[in-house]
Image (cartoon, helix red, strand yellow):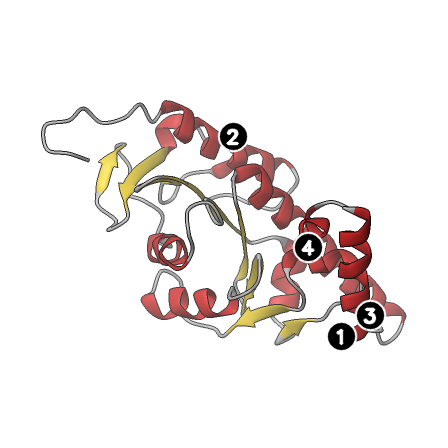
């Protein structure tokens, strides 16, 4: 922001983040103060505040920071996972990743307590980039955890966090929220399939065939190539 210039109107961005938190809480992916949501506009990031009850999130519960983490607007301390959000945005162009959702979704968290990777047993998982990595455990709110998650997200739209939860990213909040929904569905599917036997993972060739079929048919995000 140029010296002496008025801050932009951030009401819409803060409202969108609050509404996304409400949507996630309504379906049980956020509980209490566990989890956080952010959206980026240019050099600014609107992110849920620390310790707020996300099922009651309002505009006032969303703080705006710059890409160095300095508070620009809002009265609350940003989420303890601010380093994670800022770091992920630093890794991606703004037109590729402009929203991040971190949840403690039940099935995702259960998978993250057991597996090192969520394998591709259903072709819809390719919307997230393939097998979902589980970032190694580190204490919440630390640079170490942020680094592990950033590495797990390379080439992916979602990652799990060992003994912690899940992260989903997107070009906008709607996409990040939908990716969080999909990840929880896939984790639940794996849990149910495992109860019946050993799930069959799709081979690399089978996964490539799905992507090719989607491109030929111009089918959804996979069809975009």
- Which residue is rendered at x = 42% and y = 46% of the image? 94
Say which label, 1 or 2, has the lower sequence index.
2
> In this orientation, which residue lies closer to the viewer: 12 or 103?
12
Counting from the top left corner in percent of width and height, residue 28 is at 64, 43
Tag 3: Cα neighbours inside 10 Å, few (<14), some, or many (≥20)?
few
Can residue 139 be seen in this snapshot? no
Give the residue furthest to the right: 196
Residue identified by numbered label 2: 19
> In this orientation, which residue lies closer to the viewer: 146 or 6?
6
Tag 2: Cα neighbours inside 10 Å, few (<14), some, or many (≥20)?
many
Counting from the top left corner in percent of width and height, residue 156 is at 57, 62
Question: Distance from label 4 to label 2 (Cα)?
Answer: 24 Å
Helix, strand or loop under label 4: helix
Which numbered circle lies on residue 127?
4
The image quarter containing residue 44 is top left
Say which label, 2 or 3, has the lower sequence index.
2
Q: How many marks?
A: 4
Residue identified by numbered label 3: 206
Say which label, 4 or 2, has the lower sequence index.
2
Q: Quick one: quadrant of the N terminus?
A: top left
Question: Distance from label 1 to label 4 (Cα)?
Answer: 15 Å
Q: Nearer the viewer, mark 2 or mark 3?
A: 3
> In this orientation, which residue lies closer to the viewer: 172 or 60?
172
Residue identified by numbered label 1: 204
Q: Quick one: quadrant of the C terminus?
A: bottom right
Say which label, 1 or 4, has the lower sequence index.
4
The answer to whether the residue labelled 3 contacts the one labelled 4, judged by CB atoms less than 8 Å apart, is: no
């Amino acid at each position: 922001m140029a010296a002496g210039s008025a801050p932009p109107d951030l009401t819409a961005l803060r409202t969108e983040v609050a509404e996304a938190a409400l949507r996630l809480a309504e379906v049980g992916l956020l509980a209490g103060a566990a989890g956080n949501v952010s959206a980026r506009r240019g050099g600014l990031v609107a992110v849920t505040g620390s310790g707020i009850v996300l099922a009651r999130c309002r505009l006032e519960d969303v703080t705006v920071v710059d890409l160095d983490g300095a508070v620009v607007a809002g009265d609350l301390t940003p989420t303890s996972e601010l380093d994670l959000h800022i770091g992920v945005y630093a890794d991606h162009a703004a037109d590729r990743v402009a929203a991040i959702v971190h949840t403690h979704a039940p099935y995702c968290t259960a998978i993250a307590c057991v597996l090192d990777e969520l394998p591709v047993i259903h072709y819809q998982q390719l919307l997230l980039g393939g097998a979902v990595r589980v970032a190694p455990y580190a204490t919440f709110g630390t640079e170490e955890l942020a680094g592990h998650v950033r590495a797990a997200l390379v080439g992916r739209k979602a990652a799990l966090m060992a003994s912690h939860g899940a992260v989903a990213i997107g070009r906008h909040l709607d996409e990040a929220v939908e990716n969080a929904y999909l990840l929880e569905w896939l984790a639940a599917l794996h849990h149910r399939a495992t109860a019946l036997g050993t799930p069959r993972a799709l081979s690399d060739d089978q996964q490539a065939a799905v992507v090719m079929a989607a491109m030929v048919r111009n089918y959804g995000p996979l069809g975009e190539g």
